[in-house]
Image (cartoon, rainbow, N blue to C red):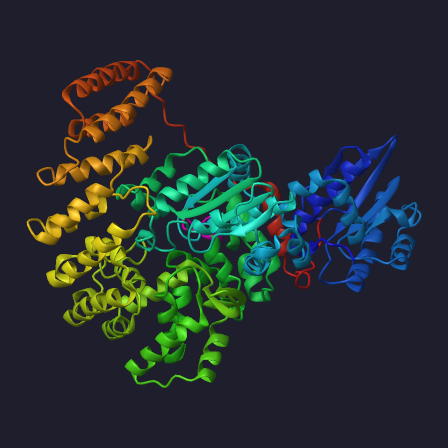
Amino acid sequence: MFVRDFTVVSDREFEELVADLLQAELDTHVERFPPGRDGGVDLQWRLGEETVIGQCKHYARSGYSKLLRELRREAEKVSKNKPDDYWVVTSVDLTGRQKKEIHELFQPWMRSPGNVLGARDLDGMLTRFPAVERRHIKLLFSTGEQLTTLVHAGIVNRTRAFQKRIERARPAYAVTQAHHEATDLLKKHRVCVIVGPPGIGKTSLGMMLVAQAIGDGYQPVEVSEDIHDAFAMLREDEKQVFFYDDFLGELSYAEHLGRKNEQRRIEEFIEEVVHSSTALLVMTSREYILRDARRMHDPVGRIAAKPFVVRLAQFPLPDAARVLYNHLWHASLPGPALGDLANDGWMRIAGHHGFNPRVVDWCVQSEFVGDGRHYVSRVVAALDNPETIWETTFNGLREFDRLLLYVLSTLHGNFSTVEEACAILDALCRETGLRFTESELHRALDVLEGTFTNVEMATHWSSGQQKTVREVRFMNPSIRAFVLRRIAADVSVCRNVLRTATDLNALELLWFGDEQGLIDGRRQWSSRLSPQVREAFVAAAQRVTAQSQRYYRAILFWNCMLPAWRPDREWLTQVVEAHIVELSTDDDEDTVDPYPYNSVLAELRGTDVGKRLHACVDAKTNVDFFDDYLDTWDRLAEHIRAHRSDCELAGSARVQEAFEDFVVGELEYLAETSNEPDVDRLLEVASIADILSPPALQQRLREALQRAKTSDSGRDSQQAPASVKISWDGNLLQDFERLLRPEPPEPHDCEIQ
């Protein structure tokens, strides 16, 4: 049996594939014709003095009977064209007898049954011409068996769910300009970081980059918790591609808090991959989360300035149209919806200022489509306000189902297990007067499956024992954000969720939410204005900290709380006392970051516990490990500036010597790149020097800065590029005309013309 699954490509993608394969096989130029009423001609090429016509039929889902009926109609067109030779290429898997039957239809224009190519023939050609397959990434791997043979035995179970997500994403994926840019960056730097707003297609693009790498023999490794997973799986003698989706958190930067050494370890892993000959790394992040990391002076925020970052923004019109076309082609829309999309209806969607692949993906699901009436207006309304696409379905759920979503939305990580959710759900049911049963849980999981969540079986290891568990993920992070907003908008629900929370993660998610913020946000949520919620929040913070004993994370979270929502001084003192013990006994860290302690030290200034924490933090701050990280020096300078009178690092010869070495390196680099001086960076170094270095070094920096400004002012300022008017591609217009014509073909058997 052949390997490739041709159902993942659309009709126009299939025609492009066939043209490329024939051109490679016949070593001649194959001409493609625009879509439309083709008169029986999709492709044309010359062999010697003869003109050959080719017809492509993408009927992989419909089968041979439907193909044969259509070819009988095509035979009449061929007799009018009278070609020197005629070929038929189809995605249907044909037997020898079926090829002869097709050959008889087209005599005398088709010379032999060898002019009929089926799926098995195309599969063999793809094997012979791997360069063609690499250009058509959706075919790079097509079966679970193929991927499993590529995956290291130790991570097969862990990667299987990831493989399924790639398989689900492939059919509707459209190769855009951003894909080509990301491919080039990954090839050049071995690392690609994809950044953009929610729903723009970061994860889909990342997974397709992984699919390409798998096709080139790389073994995929999904990083699901933190970068330590990647270090644990890194093998120098194996080709590996690492995928770290939402590496700074799914919804907010708060999810990144409390991960010891995570920032520095991410940078170290990137450096490891950049200088590797066998590893690739693909990471994604929401733009606003990366921006928050930079605003909070997190060293990992400097990734934003790296050359391997690709930014996704609003879709150009042709790319948006291709994405929409692929979704519509693979969907089974009823006649009223197709009719509404015709007559330029589809342009209202593809040309929408808020065009978003995630919303489009939802809008082709049967739950949204319904009978198809007023389809375009409903899709446009969803693009105007994406929350509406989940609101109606959510309101129709039973209360038990909604409680399950509340629990899942506040659990840590990109996925949760059904087993860990059960205890919290049981407590939340008791809080709201409902009865928890296993049968009710199974019913709720079935109801939510495919709409809000996705359940997959996975193998976990605990205490050396292998255990099969059910992993639950939201279908996408925006659904999780929607559920969190529903919690924040309801005082009673928010209070009950806080009363049953078992981890700081729930509090952090409710506090920060997504870009809009929840309790501490720009919107005046009911929960933010409620004294009862504030009381439950403070009590939950005290309770979960004592249970989890994650004291450093509690300190980081305390920094972010509004004063009125913070637990009392007694709680903070107990947390700091416990954390001092942690710091004193932790020999694994090379250095601590003093910056996150600034607010706590200010609150405890003058107290015995505050003095001991300050002494411990300063003693654990080892500047020998700062290297050339400007942000790290900036954070140290801010710490010293805020606590100069109490800080043992202020005026430290060790600090001054290490910083002077850093400055010397910066000035040497500046001299090497004097034609394009980085004035902004030099200004930042100078501001840090005002706090950390003696006057002589400060003067040296001021002189260098003056030279850099003079050089910079002499360069011509760059003019902003003129705006480019983008028009609809003529071929796309004909594609949609064929797809949406009044008598459309049966689902999944659109012909290529």
Residue at horizontal 11 percent and vertical 37 percent from the top: 644
Residue at horizontal 46 percent and vertical 44 percent from the top: 315
Q: Position of residue 6 (x, y in %)?
A: 70, 54
Residue 529 visible in the snapshot: yes
Q: Is residue 15 above or below residue 699?
A: below
Say which quadrant the N terminus sits in.
bottom right
Q: Is residue 733 left or right of residue 441?
A: right
Magenta region: which residues? 348-356
Q: Is residue 601 shown in magenta?
A: no
Answer with the quarter of the image where residue 552 lies. Answer: bottom left
Q: Is residue 242 above or below residue 385?
A: above
Q: Position of residue 54 (x, y in %)?
A: 80, 44
Q: Can you name the residue that lies furthest to the left here?
A: 606
In the image, 486 versus 646, the foreground residue is 646
Q: Is residue 177 left or right of residue 539?
A: right
Q: Position of residue 613 (x, y in %)?
A: 17, 49
Residue at horizontal 69 percent and vertical 38 percent from the top: 131
